[in-house]
Image (cartoon, rainbow, N blue to C red):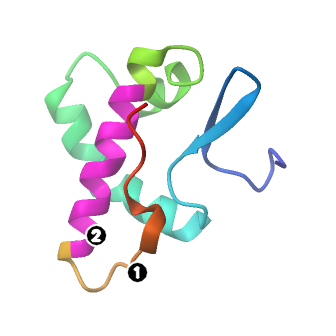
């Protein structure tokens, strides 16, 4: 996990790491672009950047970010120009 090249949010529980979002940096950026404005419209006193930061420390925010990334995955499946993520397009809720 190189901080310069890895764009995903990681969290660790019981020594096991899990990333939120697709492995591919381009696909991850496309997913975020699909939900960024909607998140900030739905949460006017918050920003998507702040959520991404808090998700590193808060399980509630991690769950919220995971939910939004699942929305992005569904939107990506509905639009052909966005490349599909395959098996990793829906993230576990545990």
The answer to whether residue 21 is left or right of residue 10 is left
* Residue at figure coordinates x 59%, y 67% from the top left: 24
Report the span colored magenta.
63-77
Residue 17 image label:
none
How far across and down, in percent of the image, does residue 55 sit? 50, 24
Is label 1 in a helix, a strand or a loop?
Answer: loop
Q: Are marks 2 and 1 in contact (CB under 8 Å)?
A: yes
Dot 2 alpha-carbon crowd within 10 angstroms: few under 14, some 14 to 19, many 20 or more: many
Magenta region, main secondary structure: helix
Q: Identify the residue under disc 1.
A: 83
Q: Is residue 84 above or below residue 44?
A: below
Residue that sits furthest to the bottom in the current view: 80
Q: Nearer the viewer, residue 12 or 49?
A: 12
* Residue at figure coordinates x 17%, y 74% from the top left: 78
The answer to whether residue 93 is left or right of residue 72 is right
How far across and down, in percent of the image, does residue 5 sit? 77, 56
Q: Nearer the viewer, residue 11 or 83?
A: 11
Q: CA distance from mark 2 to mark 1?
A: 7 Å
The quarter of the image holding the C terminus is top left
Q: Earlier in the sequence, mark 2 or mark 1?
A: 2
Q: Identify the residue under disc 2.
A: 76
How far across and down, in percent of the image, does residue 45 sit? 25, 15
């Amino acid at each position: 996990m190189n901080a310069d090249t890895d764009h995903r949010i990681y969290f660790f529980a019981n020594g096991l790491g899990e990333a939120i979002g697709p492995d591919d940096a381009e696909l991850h950026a496309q997913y975020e672009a699909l939900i960024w404005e909607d998140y900030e419209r739905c949460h006017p006193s918050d920003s998507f950047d702040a959520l991404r930061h808090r998700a590193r420390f808060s399980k509630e925010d991690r769950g919220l970010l995971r939910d939004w990334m699942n929305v992005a995955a569904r939107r990506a499946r509905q639009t052909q120009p966005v490349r599909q993520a395959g098996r990793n397009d829906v993230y576990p809720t545990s």
